[in-house]
Image (tube, rainbow, N blue to C red):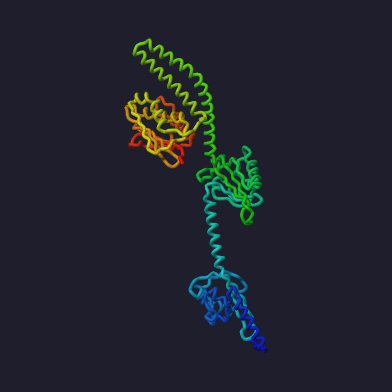
Amino acid sequence: MGTESSDPKADARSKELLDALLSGMIDAVVVIDPHGRILRVSDSVETIFGWRPGELIDQNVSVLMPEPHRSEHDGYLERYRETGRTWILGTVREFDIVRRDGSILPCELSVSRLDVPGRFGELFCGTFRDISERRRARAALARSEARFRAVFEHENQLVLLLDAEERVVDANGPTFETTGVTHEELVGEPLVDARFWSGENGNLAAVQSALERASEQGLATTRVQVDVRPSGALLSASERSTVSRSHEVSIRIVPPDVPELPYAIVEVRDITDLVAAERRESSVMRSLARLGEEAAVLSHELRSPVSSLELALKAVARQLGENERMILDDLSVRMRRLEGLMRRTLSFSRPLDLEIEPVSAALCMGVALEREASALSRSGVRGTIHVENGTPRILADAPVLEDLLSNLVRNAAEAQPGGGAVRLSARPLDADHVELAVDDEGPGIPVAERESVFRVFRTSKPDGTGLGLPLVRKIAEEHGATVRLADGESGSGLRVALAWPSEVVS
């Protein structure tokens, strides 16, 4: 198998050099003979494998292998000795190693053949690099990608990723499901050429403009129309229709720190219902503006004739009998109600000009009860006021708050035509608010209907205007207060509770 070296000193130096090399290796090195017997190892096997170098010498290298490789390794070597063929030499692959304590260590393994002159003949050298950190990082990256993909695919809105050429490189499932385009029709195409943009109303120009703004500012948003093409299995090709819906497009440029990331993220959110609601709100506001203008004119035109007519009715009543005076008094009440209706309509349709200052809740409540004394008397309703000790003053425009409370007292009286009670109360709510409440003993309002009563012109009263509670909310909100409806204090009836800003006393 060769001859031994004729220079003992040279052999000694070579051995010292080899020992030093094996001692300084960071990766684990294992040298075996053709039968798998371990001949030499680097000192680093102790750090990486947990084996002291001397413990591995003369053991079969399969001691480092998990099953099934441990049982099959001798067969691999035998086939190599017989055929001279193997795929493992000169390659790098990942391989799990069994450490001395039985734990598994992922390694990167490379095996090379050593043709050593002399008695050793053919040997094999395996180099093992610990890749446990790399594998953990890879697993963490895979989990992160899985989370991203889960979010990406389960977004309700359409999400598209663009490259630096503003071409679509990926899109989530809802993009294809909603628009009806296929993966082949979309991916690789410029964003502005996507087939789902509606060609109407300058949509393509709006998308292009948003892209340009985003490239300059990092972010841009625009509203466009998107064609939604339902393609359900139950519809024939002729039955599939194109529906254009309003969408908000948001384009965000990704910082270029990581070249592998997409250039831009495009989010397309369906806002059809929002746009419709905005249109309805705009229509209502225009209607209210016109109503305000007309109410102002009507209020001005009617105030003087109503006042004059009321004075004339009183003068005539003095000349008539008791029955005739009752008729005229009723007519006078109706005229005042008409004037009040016009005043409330005008108040609702225009912003309030408030002069807010600290006021006493008890005084405002007293004024409200005094104003509505006749309404309470007609219904047989008794009114009371209770203010807890320590209740601070509230911040309000006193006359406006008195109107609000009068409105609630009048509602309470009308809700109890057969008699009952209305209780006005105030108590500290928190450091910045006082709770003002009006409780009655009427039939109350079902929970499901409590929000609808705040809508303009919604009323169940035969002669109601539908402005009372909406006006209450309007006054409260312009004071920075909130209003809610609940069951009455006694468990029946209705409670109108207001969280009202209070004077902060230092």
The one nearer the camera, 291 or 143, is 291
Where residue 128 sits, quadrant-wise, is bottom right
Q: Against 398, is 172 above or below?
A: below
Answer with left or right where residue 486 lies relative to residue 295. left
Q: Quadrant of the N terminus?
A: bottom right
Q: In the rendered picture of this protein, how many numbered marks are placed on residues? A: 0
Residue 185 seen in this snapshot: no
- In this view, the residue farthest toward the top is 319
Residue 290 vs 247, above or below: the answer is above
Residue at position x 42%, y 26% from top?
A: 464
Q: Position of residue 87 (x, y in %)?
A: 60, 73
Q: Position of residue 436 (x, y in %)?
A: 41, 35
Front one among 203 and 88: 203
Asked if residue 119 shows in the view, the reply is: yes
Q: Position of residue 74 (x, y in %)?
A: 53, 78
The relative height of residue 172 versus residue 495 in the rendered view (above or below) is below
In the rendered view, would you say 156 is above or below 477? below
Q: Position of residue 89 (x, y in %)?
A: 61, 74
Q: Quadrant of residue 370?
A: top left
In this view, the residue farthest toward the front is: 506
User: Which of the pair 14/347 is nearer the observer?
Assistant: 347
